[in-house]
Image (cartoon, grey):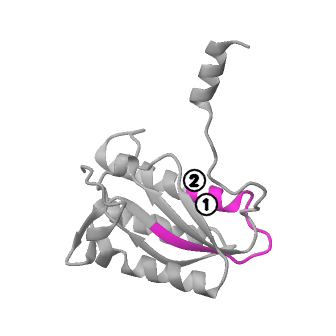
Amino acid sequence: MNPINDKISDLHHRRSIRLKEYDYSQPGAYFITICTHQREHRFGEVVNGVMQLNEFGQIAQEEWMKTALIRGEIELGEFVIMPNHFHGIIWIVDGKPVVGSIPTIVRAFKSAVSRRINLARCTPGKPVWQRNYWEHIIRDEKDLTNAQAYILNNPAQWENDELQFKGTT
C-alpha cells in the first residue's frame, strides 16, 4: 500500500449519486434538478413570485426546448428555470433511447447552455453548472403530480427555497 497513491486516488474518486443497477435509459418519467456553479444567480430573478429570465435564462430555456426536438425518444414535461437552478421532467417514451439516456441528455443540455453562455460573455471554459445533477425516478401518478406541483410552484416558493443561496451573477 502506498498512502500517497491512496490519497490521490481518493481525491479523484467521483461518487455516483445514481442508483446502482438502475437502467436510466428505460422508458419512464424522471424529475431532474441541476444547479449553477457555486449556486450563482445566472438566469434572472424572481419578482413577486414570477421568474423573470435574463439573457442567460433565455438561453437555458431555448436549449431545453431543443432537447426534445433533437431526441425523438423523449418528451418534456413541466420545467422551470430559477435564478440558480433548473427543474424539469423528462419522459423517455421510446423503447430504443440513446445510450445512457438520462445522463446523456443532461450532459448535452448542460454543455449546450454552457457553450452559448460562455460565448455571450466571452469566457470560454468557465463553469456554468455544478458538476453533477439530481434525478428522481417518478414511480406513480401521485409522485408525478407532486413533482409537477413542485416545479410549477417553485417561483412562488423562492423565498423559502433551500437552493436560493445568494450567489453572484
Q: Can residue 32 be found in the magenta stretch?
A: no
Q: How many numbered marks appear?
A: 2
Residue 107 in the figure: left or right of residue 1? left
Kindly identify which numbered label has been placed on residue 165: none
Residue 169 in the figure: left or right of residue 145? left
**In the rendering, at what x and y percent does residue 82 appear?**
35, 66
Q: Say what secondary structure mark 1 lies in.
A: helix
Judge whether 4 appears above or below 40 on screen.
above
Residue linked to disc 1:
105
Q: Nearer the viewer, residue 8 or 110?
A: 8
Q: Amino acid at mark 2?
A: Arg
Magenta region: 87-107
Q: Can residue 101 be found in the magenta stretch?
A: yes
| Residues packed near mark 2 inside 10 Å, few (<14), some (14 to 19) or many (20 plus) | some
Q: Amino acid at mark 1?
A: Ile
**In the rendering, at what x and y percent does residue 144 appear?**
58, 82
Residue 69 in the figure: left or right of residue 39? right
Q: Does the residue at mark 1 contact the one at mark 2 (Cβ under 8 Å)? A: yes
**In the rendering, at what x and y percent does residue 122 appear?**
31, 42
Judge whether 3 appears above or below 25 on screen.
above
**Quick one: quadrant of the N terminus?**
top right
Q: Nearer the viewer, residue 28 or 60?
A: 28
Residue linked to disc 2:
107
| Residues packed near mark 1 inside 10 Å, few (<14), some (14 to 19) or many (20 plus) | some
Which quadrant of the view contains residue 59? bottom left
Residue 155 in the figure: left or right of residue 5? left
Q: Nearer the viewer, residue 26 or 160?
A: 160
Q: Say what secondary structure mark 2 lies in.
A: helix
Q: Nearer the viewer, residue 57 or 66?
A: 57
